[in-house]
Amino acid sequence: MTEAMSPEGLEKALRAIGEERYHNRHPFHRLLHGGKLDRGQVQAWALNRYYYQSIIPMKDAAIISRSADPEFRRAWRQRIIDHDGTESGEGGVERWLRLTDALGFERDYVMSGSGLLPGTRFAVDAYLHFVRERSLLEAVASSLTELFAPTIIAERMAGMLANYAFIDSKALSYFDKRLHQAPRDANFALDHVKREARTPEQQKLVMGALTFKCDLLWAQLDALYHAYVAPGHVPPGAFKADADG
Amino acid sequence: MTEAMSPEGLEKALRAIGEERYHNRHPFHRLLHGGKLDRGQVQAWALNRYYYQSIIPMKDAAIISRSADPEFRRAWRQRIIDHDGTESGEGGVERWLRLTDALGFERDYVMSGSGLLPGTRFAVDAYLHFVRERSLLEAVASSLTELFAPTIIAERMAGMLANYAFIDSKALSYFDKRLHQAPRDANFALDHVKREARTPEQQKLVMGALTFKCDLLWAQLDALYHAYVAPGHVPPGAFKADADG
């Protein structure tokens, strides 16, 4: 890459990364949305994904803490409000717990993280480290997977409601909200990187950040597939459907 | 845990963690040592494990950087010397590259990390973050997996030499050295934690650190098994035996 892309060229390159690497293409999601998983496998997914949800407000606060621009900070703040709500019992993290409730988990167990796959923990923690250590531009760019979220969410809601007797629309209330929150957030972040990433080096960092984020979402599903679908090698200490569910 | 264990009781508890969680029990290692993998699968193991080897001197330097005790620092320094050698072309990292040489990789490809599994990267990076962020006691304790290394190394060398025509003793020179380095290092670290971890809280942190380290070794093999053994879902961008090997 010797010359900078236009902002539109950069957007096109970012969308191409999502086409290849976003986790809607992972076989675990095809099984999940297609109704091919049993209750224990859906439990494992919801339990592990909770850990990812739970750090999102910390991730967004780390990003805010790195910006000297009040306008940027005010806009990004909405993400924390969305996930944490304005009082106890509200917000996206709480709505994810309604899903784990519906799947029969005790909240203490879910929130303790004691049954997590190590692979989940390492991938999710890598996200926190990334937004704390890399440039603000890269931290913002790592959120761009939300560009690709609406499609997977719509597919997930329809597929899970149609296929799993143990899932109802209340259990999926998290995704209802994300359907309009994700595009708003993604467009803000996309405008930011298109405006700020003007040199070839910056554009390369932005593309690397989105690739990194796709990788960490993908790795979470790899860990789930390996442990709970085939060949079923649950690591020592992680949730086992028969024993703990 | 209401009362502190004796130093001997703590050692026993640590050895019990290794019994349950050390990666000699992982099915990937059973396949590797039993000659059940093909060349591409052994390549994938050596390529991914290189990334782990490559950060060991950084990990050990982070530990040294946290100690105010010259005696501790001098003892720990040997680990860096062992891995990096005293000049170019020496040391444990170099010896690992002799293994990837023997398996037909270009060194540039191995050292670039471009074919790594994301799961490898997240697990290995978690180790670096752990030793930088946790207490020195926990950082030292996380090295205690070396207590269990000699058995697996001896088994690995015998198994790989017997079973793989593409592996000779020169390719395994890394492990020759580790057979005597690992017990020396492990005994120093074990003495340290037995001496320093006297309260129940400290002992719990030490056991947690060893569990964490076992988890990250295990997760690396989970990622390999998932991608290269069964069901063979190589993530986008990672090494593929047919295409890259």
Image: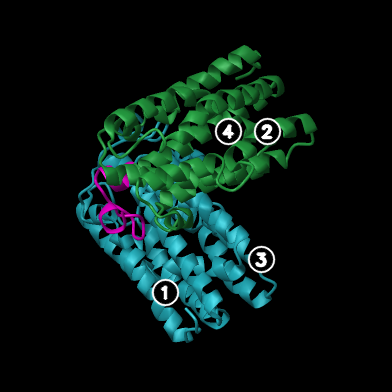
Chain colours: A cyan, B green
Amino acid type indicated by mark 4 = Ser
For label 2, the crowd category at 10 Å Cα-Cα, with few meaning under 14, some 14 to 19 and many 20 or more, is some
From the viewer's side, name the closer residue of A54 and B135: B135
Q: Where is residue B16 drawn, in percent x and y?
A: 49, 19
Mark 4 Cα within 10 Å, few/some/many (few <14, many 20+)? many
Please give the residue where the numbered disc 3 appears in the rendered image: A66
Quarter residue A161 falls in? bottom left
Discs 4 and 2 lie in a common subunit: yes
- Upstream in the sequence, badge 1 or badge 3? 1
Which disc, if any, is residue A14?
1
Q: Identify the chain of the residue marked 2, using the numbered disc in the image.
A: B
Q: Which mark is residue B116?
A: none
Provide the residue designation for mark 2: B76
Q: Nearer the viewer, mark 3 or mark 4?
A: 4
Q: Earlier in the sequence, mark 4 or mark 2?
A: 2
**Residue type, label 2:** Trp
Mark 1 vs mark 4, CA separation in Å: 38 Å
The kind of residue on which mark 1 rests is Leu
Question: In front: mark 4 or mark 2?
Answer: 2
Residue A202 at what x, y percent from top left? 55, 75
Question: Magenta segment: does it hold B232?
Answer: yes
Indicate the secondary structure of the residue bearing disc 3.
loop
Q: Residue at x 42, y 24 (%)?
A: B154
Separation of residues labelled 2 and 3 (CA atoms): 35 Å
Q: Which residues are magenta?
A: B225-245
Query: Do the dots labelled 1 and 3 sit on one chain?
Result: yes
Amino acid type, label 3: Arg
Task: Report whether residue A43 is seen.
Answer: no
Mark 2 element type? helix
